[in-house]
Amino acid sequence: MPVRLSPRVEAQEQPPTSAKLAFLRSPQVYPEPTTAVQVVETHMSWVFLTDTRAYKMKKPVRYAFLDFSTLEARRRDSEAELRLNARLAPGVYLDVVPLVRDPGTGLRLGGEGEAVEWLVRMRRLPADCMLDGLLRRHRVGPRALRVLAGVLARFYAGAAPVILPPARYLHRVQVEIETNRRVLLDPGAGLPYGITELVCSVHQDFMRRAATLLAVRVLRGRLVEGHGDLRPEHVCMSHPPLIIDCLQFNRDLRVLDAAEDLAFLAMECELLGAPWVGEILFAGYTARTGDRPGERLIAFYKSYRAALRARLAVWHLRDHKGAEAQRWRRRARAYLGLSATYIPSFAAGAPSFLLTRKTTYSAIMSRISPNLRWPWIWR
């Protein structure tokens, strides 16, 4: 049985994170030849890109929704990432590689020895085939999206229903909405009060008025262990399409209505100026599963997910200053504006300015900031 070290002992015996990062930046340490190593830092990991492979190392961090603070926790999560992503990205996630002590050089990637870190090794995907870039460049059409819709529909059709008491599922959604309200209305977020209050209040009202609609989804077996983070930048439009980076670190966040998973991707594509993608995704899903979620539910899920993304953008403000902080604030405003555009499709008594004029992203954003237009988010 492996010995599990306490965080204090582990921190004393392990090399510092800075030493691991410095080692992994060197092209000579990788088993495959590479001309350079590109390092990409995310909120929860570092990714080291060689010419043909990607190595992901988890950060030793702890949040309310995940705990990577120990070496054992990072090993378990790496193995979960390998297993869960095999569902929609077969052949991409290759193995989990130890970073070990080496008596001669200090550290070595792979092989026998005492592991001081764990990395997920992946096949590197072509950047020019990712869906977000293809949509921005207008280089993908309905035929390719129908193939993607088929892949996702087969995935949901084959997924075992997750049995949960409806009240538990409803409570989880309500907690997320309440957290959105607290974070988005915090003065430090710098978001306009009126539109923020509108979005949060409408979501809370929907949960009061339409709880039965969501409960029926649970009782009909529509909850599955889905992807959980289905964004265009996680979709490679290869043959067949591959979907990477599922939300592996927290099963509760990954268990959701299949329609919510799809609505998330549809919403993100709409932000990129491609609302037609959602229509194709749901047409393929319905054809395969026979499930018709309905426009009202889909609109709520899109609005709800856009508000969640606004909240995550606000959280990033804590880690950045200056121009980078402003970029995250613009992103939060963009998601908040998009969230509001869906309100007339699922909420009774929507504000008059949403109902008496064409409800578009630009119209909502003009209410948030007269000088803000959606392409600004990507600058």
Image (tube, rainbow, N blue to C red):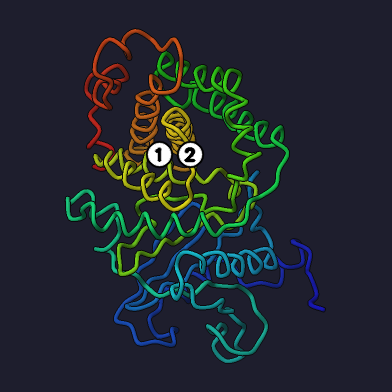
> Residue 281 versus residue 288: which sits nearer the camera?
288
Tag of residue 354? none
Which image quadrant for residue 35?
A: bottom left
Tag of residue 321? 1
Give how far apart the Cα atoms at labels 1 and 2 are.
16 Å
Q: Is residue 375 above or below residue 67?
A: above
Q: Is residue 17 above or below residue 123?
A: above
Q: Mark 1 belongs to which amino acid?
A: Lys
Q: Mark 2 belongs to which amino acid?
A: Leu
Residue at 71% across, 32% down? 167
- Give left or right: position of 321 versus 16: left
> Residue 277 versus residue 228: which sits nearer the camera?
277
Where is residue 110 drawn, in percent x and y? 55, 85
> Residue 339 versus residue 25: which sits nearer the camera?
339
Where is residue 346 drawn, in percent x and y? 44, 22
Residue at 39% across, 44% down? 282
Q: Nearer the viewer, mark 1 or mark 2?
A: 2
Where is residue 55 drawn, in percent x and y? 46, 72
Which image quadrant for residue 50?
A: bottom left
Which residue lies under the disc numbered 2?
312
